[in-house]
Image: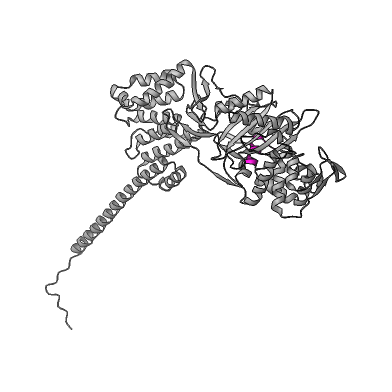
Amino acid sequence: MVIDYKGVTFSFRERRRKQFLKRIRVAVVILLLLGLYLIVANFRDAGKIKSVQQLLLDNKSAEAEEKFKASEGSFFHKDAKKELKALLQLASGDRASIESARAGLESLDSANSLVDYQKFLDYFSDHAQYRELKVYVAYLLKVKRAPDESGLLFYKAMYSAAMLDFSGSLAAMGQMPATEREKHRQELSILDKINNDMKVGKIAYIFDINGQPMAYYDVQKGRTVSLTPGMSFDAFDTLNSFNTGGHIKENLRFFSFTIDRALQEKLHQLFKNGNYHGSFLLINLTDGSIAAAYSNSLGDETRKDGIRENAVFSEPYEPGSIIKLLTLYAYLQSGGKDIFPFQCSGSFTLDKKIFYDWIKHNLVKDYEEALVVSCNLSFARMGILVGEKRLANVFKSFYFNTGNKGGLRDRYFDFKTGVFKEPGSSVYSLASLSVGLGDITVTTFHTALFSAIIAQNGAIYSPYLIKNEKNLLNLAYYNHPGELLTVSSDTAVFTKIKNAMIRVVEDKNGTGERSRVDFVQVALKTGTSGKKELGLDAILSGFFPAEKPQYAFGFRLQGVGKAELKGALFLKDFLISFYGRR
């Protein structure tokens, strides 16, 4: 076969040209794909930045932080990401984070439209984060993010007022052009009042449930002055500026409490009239709000750092017989052997020690009568029958031994609860624990909590004091979230305890009989603790109206003797005062 190459041309130059053109086409395609990728990645990162912003503005800081970290490493929108990182740090309110945010913002010299600065200005002002607002405004002024400085003067006036910088606030307001003043006319009138209050030297910033002032900040003395008898607000002068909302002189905002100041004043009068010392707590069972929290203790309520504490939430003491409510709960729930009728001889021997009662009760027919007359020996037997482990578990379910992490708190208040030492193998210690003696303490808050839980059949709203917090413009940025606490759902057991508590008042032999009034029925448990030579304390815990509970209470009167005497009479006087009867 002969191959004919006639008409066929071959050129290495042509071949190279075609290969070059092919490479060009491939390069163009790669560049187009790369450009498309960069465009898509750019838009994707821009979308992530906006998404992080929105999460932060929606108070979802954890989600915002996580999403931000996922895109922080890419090389798109570096300045916008630096600004956004600083905003995340500012929103945290942490000291180190705020200083880091300040440094990060100071390193930026140009504005970026991806971050909506106006929304963050409003966010910081709405949430009363005035130190953070000041840092961000300083950055915006440096990079001229706003059309002109006049758009930021209002925020300067606000954070200056919040930091009690009277002259700085007035100066910023004075520099605002007429258009800006008109735009913020209503807000400026509020700032005017605050500035006038600063000029006078007294700024009322804590109010009761009815809007009555409970405390004001004394500008000259640099401290908060309580207008509410039996309640200290010293802690508000020492709140950490960054981690808990701010020292009031560096971060002014307004608080609405659940306390009724008029009721506090009634309690103060009752304590004053009887020359009593102690503490009193009243819980509104409809929502867990604390209607009264009165402290007038003989104990030292001043901590080492100079803060005067509210004894009603913090002072520990031996509970005495009110603990029998929990022992009875454990006994009724255990389904154990019935110890009644029980013969109370006034004492018996445990672990070669004499265990005493106040009096010899003789025949105690049942658990109700045991609670009515508060028979120590009956409850000691109940505790021994229940056993150390079950009794300890019941106490813990009623908020004993919660430790620092498991306790109850509300915003800036810690509500301390009781502590007990488990008796181990000692029968005598178990008997003592069963009647509230020995290695066990409570607070007045805790005594009220017992009865609140019983009154509501084992489920109550978590007690709280602060209804809301507002910024300088009276916008609430915090409202108390209701939280249901469930101890038990054993309604039948709680019903039995409530019926026995009613008999404590209604029975002629009841230890609370002297507190009886004809206009409201009360469920009650009395307790007496302390030592005779130092003066016995009267401790009472209960709720009212008994048939449909609305309030639970707990109180302690120091050194007045047995609870069934002056303690019961004090409760009667309180009920007369509370209901406005004579």
- Based on the picture, tell me whether residue 450 belongs to the magenta stretch: yes
Query: Within the image, what quadrant is residue 510 found in?
Result: top right
| Residue 315 percent coordinates (x, y) | 67, 32
Q: Which residue is pictured at 38% across the width and 43% down the height? A: 54
| Residue 447 percent coordinates (x, y) | 66, 38
- Horizontal arrangement in the rendering, residue 103 relative to residue 404 (left or right): left
- Horizontal arrangement in the rendering, residue 82 relative to residue 4 (left or right): right
Residue 430 appears in the picture as rendered: no
415 w.r.t. 23: above or below: above
- Horizontal arrangement in the rendering, residue 138 relative to residue 246 (left or right): left
Residue 497 appears in the picture as rendered: yes
| Residue 430 percent coordinates (x, y) | 78, 46
| Placement of the C terminus among the 4 image quadrants | top right
- Horizontal arrangement in the rendering, residue 257 relative to residue 390 (left or right): left
Q: Which residue is pictured at 28% across the width and 51% down the height? A: 35
418 w.r.t. 199: above or below: below
Furthest toward the front, the residue is: 518
Q: Which residue occupies the foreground of this view, 176 or 212?
A: 212
Q: Which residue is pictured at 30% across the width and 24% down the height? A: 182
Judged by its main secondary structure, the magenta piece is: helix
Figure label count: 0
| Residue 186 percent coordinates (x, y) | 35, 26
- Based on the picture, tell me whether residue 371 belongs to the magenta stretch: no
Furthest toward the right, the residue is: 352
Q: Which residue occupies the foreground of this view, 483 or 540?
A: 540
Furthest toward the bottom, the residue is: 1
Q: Which residue is pictured at 66% across the width and 31% down the height? A: 572
Query: Within the image, what quadrant is residue 112 found in?
Result: top left
Q: Give the range drawn in magenta.
A: 442-451
Type of colouring: one colour
| Placement of the N terminus among the 4 image quadrants | bottom left
